[in-house]
Image (spheres, rainbow, N blue to C red):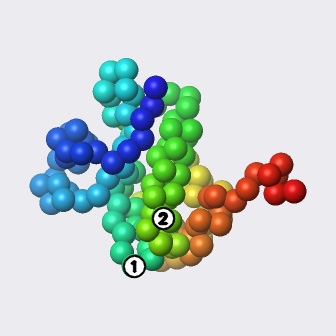
Amino acid sequence: MVKIGFPREFNQIKALFPEKEKERDLYIVAENTANSEILGAVRFFYHDEQVDIYEMLMTYEGEQVIAVFDGIIRTLLYKMAEEGCTTLTVQGATGEFADYFKDHQFLEEDGVLIHRAYPGEFFKPCAGCSE
């Protein structure tokens, strides 16, 4: 089973982010509860009405990697929307992760992917629910 949440202790993810200056940053992780293995992690900050994603690491490389990544991102964005955030910036997204955000209507500005109204994009009702 996969559990997504905010790590209680940095030691859980220290191997992924060994730089001393990252110890006080904010993280959300996906963990395989069967063996306590970290499947992926996102380093972020938020302020005012904006969330900034600085790093995305996926240690899981199975065929469901995008599904796990999507779970991490949606969990983070739901929590941040509860905090009043509406804008999301993503730095350093490449490959399938960049495609993921571009598929969600993110625009590239000055080398950063940005969406200024992400709750409407990520949490819109499904086609069957909107009728």
- Spot occupied by residue 20 in the image (x, y as percentages of width and height): 12, 55
Specify the label residue 130 is tagged with.
none
Q: Secondary structure at mark 1?
A: loop
Q: Quarter-wise, where is residue 58 in the image? A: top left
Q: In the image, is residue 10 above or below residue 3?
A: below
- Spot occupied by residue 15 in the image (x, y as percentages of width and height): 20, 39
Separation of residues labelled 1 and 2 (CA atoms):
12 Å
Horizontal arrangement in the rendering, residue 47 relative to residue 85 (left or right): left
Which residue: 24% across, 59% down? 25
Horizontal arrangement in the rendering, residue 130 relative to residue 80 (left or right): right
Quadrant in which the C terminus appears? bottom right
**Pointer 2 local density, CA inside 10 Å: few below 14, some 14–19, many at least 20:** few
Which residue: 49% across, 59% down? 77
Specify the label residue 48 is tagged with.
1
Residue lying furthest top: 34
Horizontal arrangement in the rendering, residue 95 relative to residue 47 (left or right): right
Disc 2 target residue: 82
Q: Earlier in the sequence, mark 1 or mark 2?
A: 1
- From the image, state whether disc 1 or disc 2 is nearer to you: 2
Q: In the image, is residue 110 above or below residue 122?
A: below
Q: Quarter-wise, where is residue 14 in the image? A: top left
**Pointer 1 local density, CA inside 10 Å: few below 14, some 14–19, many at least 20:** few
Which residue: 39% across, 79% down? 48
Q: Quarter-wise, where is residue 29 in the image? A: top left
- Residue 89 visible? The answer is no
Say which amino acid is labelled 1.
Answer: Asp
Which residue: 51% across, 57% down? 78
